[in-house]
Image (spheres, grey):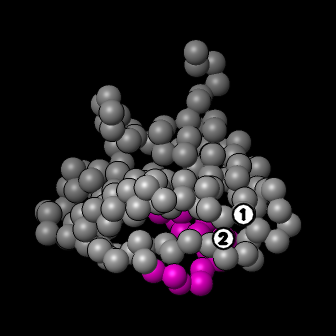
């Protein structure tokens, strides 16, 4: 339960950033901050779903089964929400956040920062769990270019 609670705390902080991103002037820095916050929110929801929900590729009824609360706005009580979203809705939200993040972040962000390659790798992994194998390959090819070592 500690992992669950800690994840929603970080999600809440990412949402606070996203709720206030409009206060920053339009710039590549603002886009980068927004992209990193979206990716962080998405990957934490994905990790919680992997632990507490059925996995779509491992159960035929997983997509229609009960998912987790997907918090999209700052909500200090997100941990206690019991909204009836499905696993499918959770994965679609994760994918939407990661694809938007991919479009916003810089290609080269430096050590310890999310960049396009890292987010492409995350998208590949999420699509693997979701069962969309063409997208797994598409994003894996971006994350790990052919011939790289």
How far apart are the two marked residues, 1 and 2, measured between alpha carbons? 7 Å
Which corner quadrant of the image does residue 66 belong to? bottom right
Which corner quadrant of the image does residue 138 belong to? top right
Judge whether residue 24 is colored magenta.
Answer: no
Is the stretch drawn in magenta largely helix, strand or loop?
helix
Marks 1,2: beta carbons within 8 A: yes
Q: Which residue is mark 1?
A: 54
Quadrant into which the C terminus falls? top right
Residue 98 visible: no
Badge 1: few (under 14), some or many (20 or more) residues near its Cα, within 10 Å?
Answer: some
Numbered range of the magenta stretch:
81-99
Badge 2: few (under 14), some or many (20 or more) residues near its Cα, within 10 Å?
Answer: many
Q: Earlier in the sequence, mark 1 or mark 2?
A: 1
Question: Relative to the observer, which residue lies in front, 147 or 40?
Answer: 40
**Relative to 100, is 81 above or below?**
below
Comparing marks 1 and 2, which lies closer to the viewer? Answer: 1
Report the residue that reaches farthest toward the front: 1
**Relative to 147, is 142 above or below?**
below
Tag shown at residue 88: none
Question: Relative to the observer, which residue lies in front, 17 or 110?
Answer: 17
Residue displayed at 48% across by 45% down: 119
Tag shown at residue 87: 2
């Amino acid at each position: 339960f500690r992992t669950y609670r800690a994840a929603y705390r970080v999600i809440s902080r990412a949402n606070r950033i996203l709720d206030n991103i409009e206060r920053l002037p339009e710039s590549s820095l603002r886009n980068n901050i927004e992209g990193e916050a979206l990716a962080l929110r998405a990957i934490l929801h994905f990790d919680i779903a992997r632990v507490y929900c059925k996995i779509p590729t491992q159960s035929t009824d997983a997509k229609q089964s009960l998912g987790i609360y997907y918090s999209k706005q700052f909500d200090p009580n997100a941990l206690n929400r019991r909204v009836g979203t499905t696993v499918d809705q959770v994965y679609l939200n994760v994918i939407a956040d990661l694809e938007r993040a991919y479009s916003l972040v810089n290609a080269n962000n430096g050590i310890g920062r999310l960049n396009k390659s890292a987010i492409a790798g995350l998208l590949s992994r999420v699509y693997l769990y979701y069962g969309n194998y063409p997208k797994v390959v598409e994003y894996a090819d971006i994350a790990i270019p052919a011939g790289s070592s």
